[in-house]
Image: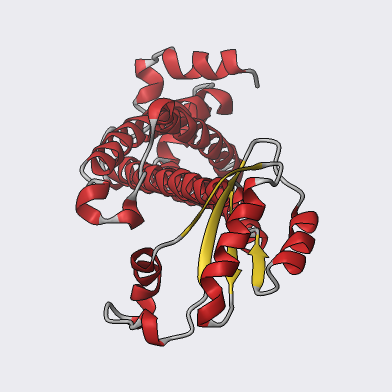
Amino acid sequence: MTFRDILADLTTPDRHAARVVPPSGHTAWLTSFTAGAMTFLAVFALALSLASGRLADRWSEALARTATIRISAPADQQAAQTQAVLDLLATTPGIASARALTDEEQRALLEPWFGPDLPLDSLPVPRLVELTETGDGYDGEGLRQRLAAEAPGALLDDHTRWRQPLATAASRLRLLGTVSLLLILAAMAAMITLAANAALAANAQVIRVLRLVGARDVYIARAFVRRFTLRALGGAAAGTVAGMLGILLLPSADAAGGFLTGLGFQGAGWLLPLLLPPLAALVAFFATRLAAFRKLNELT
């Protein structure tokens, strides 16, 4: 069956065939409600998947451009080794900038774990040097050898152990979003199939009469397919609108904190939910068509 045939089945009204399918009843609201609820969930699954993937990519990209040097040395040598590291980095190709973190910045980094009253002066806390690389990057192994020679207490952390898990998380979050959407569409297809089977069973006597007067199974199936597909399309459209409104009503990043930063759709991403109603209608079309012909064969 071609796309033109699908459009013809949906856009060509037949008031006689439409009488085969009851215009109201539990199958009507079940189909519309299922399509609307599943599409509503699909909008949020899509939004969360895209937002989580963007967040993981942003973290990974930020870590990819920076590195940290940890200087562990006696208190009377720490300042000298820190200056030696800064001088070394200033002559290292591929390093755009480097600076030593202040006591206040280090205290802010440790505050979530140790509280705000951490006495840095009385604790052997290493001095951290943050460096930013250029687009061409630097020779990590060569820098480690130079640090070992000129500042034995300095260790380079290029964030590889942080960057790789974030890149993996981004790909898995996108995969999770895709699997969630497929499961939602599968659940929608199952519920619509049950509703179509119920409608066909309820109209078994009408179907037998139609066959007696010469109606073909294709004619009967088309009536069910068109009615259920349009019901699913209407319900999915309502669910998409409700889902997009729900995304818009979510608190902003300033009000909710960093966890919700970027949650939702951005730019052209707002067009993606608009693909869900046609996709739901397509799922309903094939689910109802298969159910209709299977049930008609049983009623033979």
Residue 163: image quadrant is: bottom right
Image coordinates for residue 48, horizontal then vertical, percent: 42, 49
Identified at 33% across, 82% down, the residue is 118
Closest to the observer, 268 or 110: 110
Q: Looking at the image, can residue 297 be seen?
A: yes
Identified at 34% across, 26% down, the residue is 19
Closest to the observer, 128 or 50: 128
Image coordinates for residue 44, horizontal then vertical, percent: 37, 47
Count of marks placed on residues: 0
Q: Quadrant of the N terminus?
A: top right
Identified at 61% across, 53% down, the residue is 87
Image coordinates for residue 199, horizontal then vertical, percent: 40, 43
Colouring scheme, one of rainbow, by chain, secondary structure, one colour: secondary structure
Closest to the observer, 91 or 117: 91
Identified at 43% across, 86% down, the residue is 123
The vertical placement of 6 against 277, above or below, is: above
Residue 73: image quadrant is: bottom right
The vertical placement of 115 against 202, above or below, is: below
Image coordinates for residue 127, horizontal then vertical, percent: 51, 70
Extreme-bottom residue of the structure: 122
Q: Quadrant of the C terminus?
A: top right
Q: Looking at the image, can residue 189 be seen?
A: no
